[in-house]
């Protein structure tokens, strides 16, 4: 890559967001595989709402909405949320059905540090859809003391 | 008994999609945190949340240590008929609590 002036000036910014280690990435990938049973995941349909800049990692509001009519023939079966750099990759998983009305879920979570969050939805046809969001945390949750 | 805050509509039209919110007072101790003596505090987590509408489970969630203290959850369901809506939390150390509200559907 050619180092332009813009890239050079942006470089210190990248240091503020420490890259996830290979172990973190593998752990997240393993947790996602557990959820999907190895089926391919596609980007889209899922919207994971979380503030991109979090001041307090002890209680971070998140919500997940999936585009679906939630009918008997086309609905979400499960939604799972995963993280990259907490001590455990699982955050929450929930079951839905045509009686849910909407594929919607909101909760408050802990984030140990700046990291990626991934929301995955399993549709009744067996397909998996996901969205990945990067979050910067200024005050980490007391997860590891 | 832990304190619980619930937001459930009292009266709705049949077929309406209603949002319910539930919050329960709980430490959600992760098991990764040392106390003042440097000893890890034992894990104390609520693992499951179930909402039953007239006896049928309409929403179930599995929590984790990544859920903030005093777990909050919001979700929706379709108002089908008048009846009880119950909310059950279960977790470590035999924690189990159920709260029930009545909804009237017109």
Image (cartoon, rainbow, N blue to C red):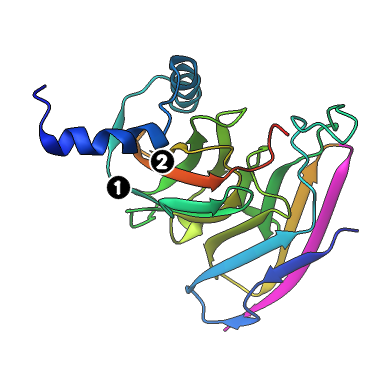
Task: Count the marks.
Answer: 2
Q: What's the chain of the residue with tag 2?
A: A
Position of A22 compared to A68: left or right?
A: right
Q: Which residues are magenta?
A: B93-106
Say few, some or many: other residues with alpha carbon within 10 Å of mark 2 (under 14 / 14 to 19 / 20 or more).
many
Label 2: which residue? A121
Looking at the rendered image, the quarter that the N terminus of chain A falls into is top left
Q: Nearer the viewer, residue A39 or B33?
A: B33
Q: Which of the 4 image quarters holds residue B38? A: top right
* Residue B51 is at least partly visible in this image: yes
Contact check, label 1 and label 2, Cβ < 8 Å: yes
Label 1: which residue? A45
Q: Nearer the viewer, residue A118 or B78?
A: A118
* The magenta stretch spans residue B101: yes
Position of B106 compared to A98: left or right?
A: right
Q: Are discs 1 and 2 located on one and the same chain?
A: yes
């Amino acid at each position: 890559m050619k180092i332009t002036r813009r890239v050079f000036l942006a470089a210190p910014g990248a240091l503020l967001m420490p890259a996830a280690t290979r172990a973190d990435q593998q752990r997240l990938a393993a947790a996602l595989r557990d959820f999907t049973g190895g089926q391919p995941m596609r980007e889209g349909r899922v919207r994971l709402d979380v503030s991109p800049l979090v001041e307090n990692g002890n209680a971070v509001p998140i919500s997940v909405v999936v585009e679906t009519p939630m009918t008997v023939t086309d609905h979400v079966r499960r939604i799972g949320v995963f993280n990259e750099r907490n001590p455990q990759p699982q955050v929450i998983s929930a079951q839905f059905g045509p009686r849910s009305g909407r594929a919607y879920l909101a909760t408050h979570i802990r984030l140990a540090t700046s990291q990626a969050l991934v929301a995955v939805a399993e549709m009744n046809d067996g397909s998996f859809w996901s969205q990945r969001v990067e979050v910067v945390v200024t005050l980490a949750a007391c997860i590891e003391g | 008994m832990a304190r619980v805050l619930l937001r459930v509509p009292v009266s709705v039209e049949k077929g309406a999609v209603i949002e319910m919110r539930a919050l329960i007072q709980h430490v959600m101790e992760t098991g990764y945190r040392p106390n003042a003596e440097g000893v890890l505090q034992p894990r104390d987590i609520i693992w499951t949340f179930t909402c039953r509408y007239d006896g049928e489970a309409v929403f179930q969630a599995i929590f984790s240590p990544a859920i903030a203290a005093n777990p909050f959850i919001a979700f929706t369901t379709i108002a089908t008929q008048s009846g009880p809506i119950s909310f059950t939390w279960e977790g470590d150390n035999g924690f189990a609590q159920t709260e029930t509200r009545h909804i009237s559907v017109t």
